[in-house]
Amino acid sequence: AQRVTQPEKLLSVFKGAPVELKCNYSYSGSPELFWYVQYSRQRLQLLLRHISRESIKGFTADLNKGETSFHLKKPFAQEEDSAMYYCALRRRETSGSRLTFGEGTQLTVNP
Amino acid sequence: DTGVSQNPRHKITKRGQNVTFRCDPISEHNRLYWYRQTLGQGPEFLTYFQNEAQLEKSRLLSDRFSAERPKGSFSTLEIQRTEQGDSAMYLCASSLVAHYEQYFGPGTRLTVT
C-alpha cells in the first residue's frame, strides 16, 4: 500500500522568504508524484508533477527516490501563494489509478 | 463553465436517512473518480469509473455506499442509512483515459445530524 506524509499542517513565512513544503512517501513500486493546490474558495487543482520537471508559478519539486521525498520549493514566496497544498502519489504501473493524498499543508505568506 | 460540477453543494440530513449526490464530469472525460475529505485530512479515494464500468473500489466504500455511472456520463453516489461519521466533503474528479491530470469539482458537503 502507498502512503504520503506531509509533516507540517501549518507553515507561515514572510513575503520574499524561501519556502519549502515537505512531502515524504512510501511505496514499493514506481510512483508518480504530484502537488495539488487549493486556493481560498476554489477547487483543488494540479500545480505540478514530478515527470514534467517544470517550474509552475515559481515552484519546483524534485523527486528524491533515495529519501522517498518530493518537497515543494519556491525561492521567494508571494502573498498569492497562500493556500492549502497537497502532495499526492499515483502508481505508475496502473495508469489512471487512484491518487493517494497527504494530509495537506496550509501555507500562509505574510506581508 | 465547462468544469466538473457537483450537486447539491451542501446537504444536511438526519442520521439514518439516505442521500444521493450527482457529479457531471468534463464532457469528453471517460474517467470519473470519487473522493471523500474529512476535516484536516487530504482527500481519500472511494471509487472510479472508466465509462460506465466501475474499475476500482476502496475498502472505505462500505456496503452502505453505492456509486453508478449508467451511461458513462454523469455519476451518482448514494449513501444509505447515513451515520454521523459520514459527514465530510465528497469530491468528484474526471480525467481522460491514461492522462495524469484529474480535474476536481467543487465538492458536496454532507452534514449528518
Image (cartoon, coloured by chain):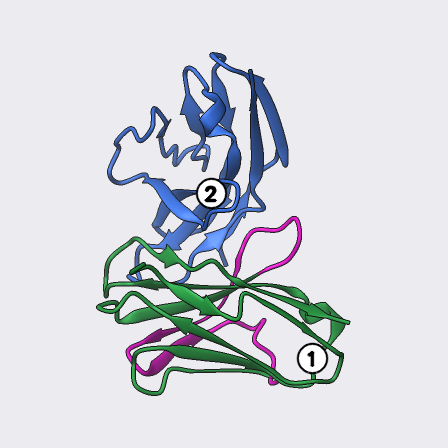
Q: Secondary structure at mark 2?
A: strand
Residue at coordinates 28% horizontally, 54% vertically from top-left? B100
Q: Secondary structure at mark 1?
A: loop
| A75 and A45: which is toward the camera | A45
| First to last magenta residue range | B37-64
Report x, y in % for residue B43: 53, 56
Report x, y in % for residue B94: 34, 64
Which amino acid type is marked by label 1? Thr
| B18 and B31: which is toward the camera | B18
Quadrant in the rendering for residue B88: bottom right
Does the magenta portion include B40?
Answer: yes
Image chain in blue? A
In the rendered image of the structure, the colour used to display chain B is green
Residue at coordinates 43% horizontally, 51% vertically from top-left? A28
Residue at coordinates 75% horizontally, 78% vertically from top-left? B14
Quadrant in the rendering for residue B61: bottom right
Residue under numbered circle 1: B82
Residue at coordinates 24% horizontally, 63% vertically from top-left? B96
Checking the image for residue A87, the label placed there is 2
Which amino acid type is marked by label 2? Cys
> From the viewer's perspective, is A57 left or right of A41?
left
